[in-house]
Amino acid sequence: MDGILTGIVHLEASPPAPLAENSSLILAASRTHRHDPLDNFKRYGGGWNITNEHYWASVGFTGAPYFAIAGVWFIGFGLVLLVLLCYHCCCKRRVKLDELHEKAYTISLILLILFTCAGIAGSILLYVGQDKFHRNISHTLDYVVDQSEFTVQNLRNVSGYLDLAKTMGIDQVFLPVSDQQNIDDLNRKLNRAANDLESKTKENSRTIRDVLDNVRFTLIVVAAAMLVLAFLGLLFSIFGLKTLVYFLVLGAWFLVAGTFILCGVFVLLNSAVGDTCVAMKEWVAHPYEDTALDHILPCVDVATAEQSLNQSKTVTSKVVTVVNKVLSTVANSNFPPNAGPLYYNQSGPLVPTLCDPYTGRLDDRQCNAGEVNLTNAPQVWKNYTCTVSSSGICATTGRITPDIYKQLIVAVNISYGLYHYTPFLVNLEDCTFVRETFGTITVDYCPGLRQHLRWVYIGLALVSTGIMLSIIFWVVYSKQRRRRDEYIKQHADGQYMARENNKS
């Protein structure tokens, strides 16, 4: 983009060599020193870089344990269910209850209640964590969008003041044609930069919000499903509803595997967010370095920003020059009545000239005695304005007609507007604006994001583990209850037969 926000750095896909003089700055180097499955599990050394597939592979590897657990659970428990089904269909069952089985019945019930409580606690933590995470990341996104809109609006304001300066005239005195052409060239760059930044911000914001809404909906559904699953599993098991328990086991088998996978996804997301926060913090101290972080919010094109700053200062000085030329050669001159349009019966004290806030080298300068600054010029010059007759000639003492006064005020407002936006352009030139944005994110938003992400994946891990163990004890407890019920029935039948034999 030939505008303010340029300079995106395209890094190579392979891990870069160690940082040397004049090379790119490796961000979050120590934090991202992880195993890379795409490079024979060697340590990744390229630092934070969202365009590098090796970086994403190393980040994804942080969630590998949970993906592995999901696979082992799905395959292993599936095989267990298959074995139990074969045993139930092909093998005869013998009921023999002794003290050990009675203890197993009691222990399985206690463990079932314990793991159900763990699953419920995980569901609650997951719901609370996702809500706080969604709010925090939404606030972060709102802040970034606000900063972008602030930049766009200021760029357009600067462009608007430059447009006004180009068409401004006082008593038929205008800016030189060469300055007007320079303003046109700069305005094209400013407007292109503002339009590109605005469109990209809206597009990215819309995409991110859609993803966040989908993630939030998914987590809420998972939390609610796991909570219902835990209650129903405990309820069906206690009341001995075998058929419903078995159907619930089949559904939970898939859901637990999916929840473990989701947990792994949030673990790697937490790694990526942590890497980004560290990368931002390191970049704040080195804003001019060549880094991969330029892909998020590129630092300014220094040449274009400097051109904008210099042109803004130049136009401000040129407008002041036009104003002072009119004051010195027209308002403060005593022309005879035959001087034509230059004469309008000027009289009274001389009008103070306008202070140029910049030197010839565009450095800041102090106003001289007898000059008025951009802030108080309208009030001071109002005292030098006369009342004109129907022919446009001053009928009272004064050196400025109302029409000239209006033109002077327009010129002062233009100069003041450009002068007012000078600090903004300076911040663009030296990357202060971007540094402040990243600094605010790392201090105000990153801690909350990382904390609530941990809540989410801890909640997912807790609810997955709790329901996984609950499923096992649904089966175990149901089996123990069935054996116990059959024994009690058989024992009751035996006692009844014994009493009948004794009677006979």
Image (tube, helix red, strand yellow):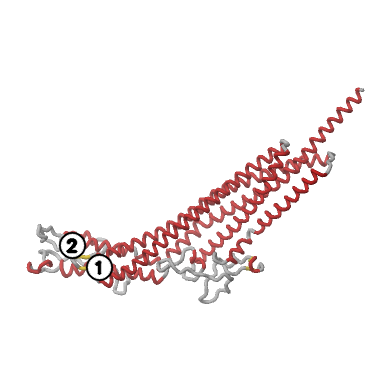
Question: Which image quarter: residue 245?
Answer: top right
Query: In the rendered image, is residue 365 in sight?
Result: no
The numbered dot on residue 75 is none
The quadrant of the image that shows the C terminus is top right
Give the residue number, with chain letter if any, for mark 1. Answer: 320
First in sequence: mark 2 or mark 1? Answer: 1
Question: Which image quarter: residue 430?
Answer: bottom left
Image-based side of 175 in relation to 349, left or right: right
User: Percent from the top left, x then y, of residue 383?
Assistant: 17, 59
- Marks 2/1: CA–CA distance: 15 Å
Give the residue number, with chain letter if any, for mark 2. Answer: 404
Residue at disc 1, secondary structure: helix
Image-based side of 371 in relation to 286, left or right: left
Q: Residues within 10 Å of mark 2 (few under 14, many from 20)?
A: some
Residue in front for this viewpoint, 377 or 291: 291
Residue at disc 2, secondary structure: helix
Furthest toward the front, the residue is 90
Going by the numbered disc 1, the residue's amino acid type is Val
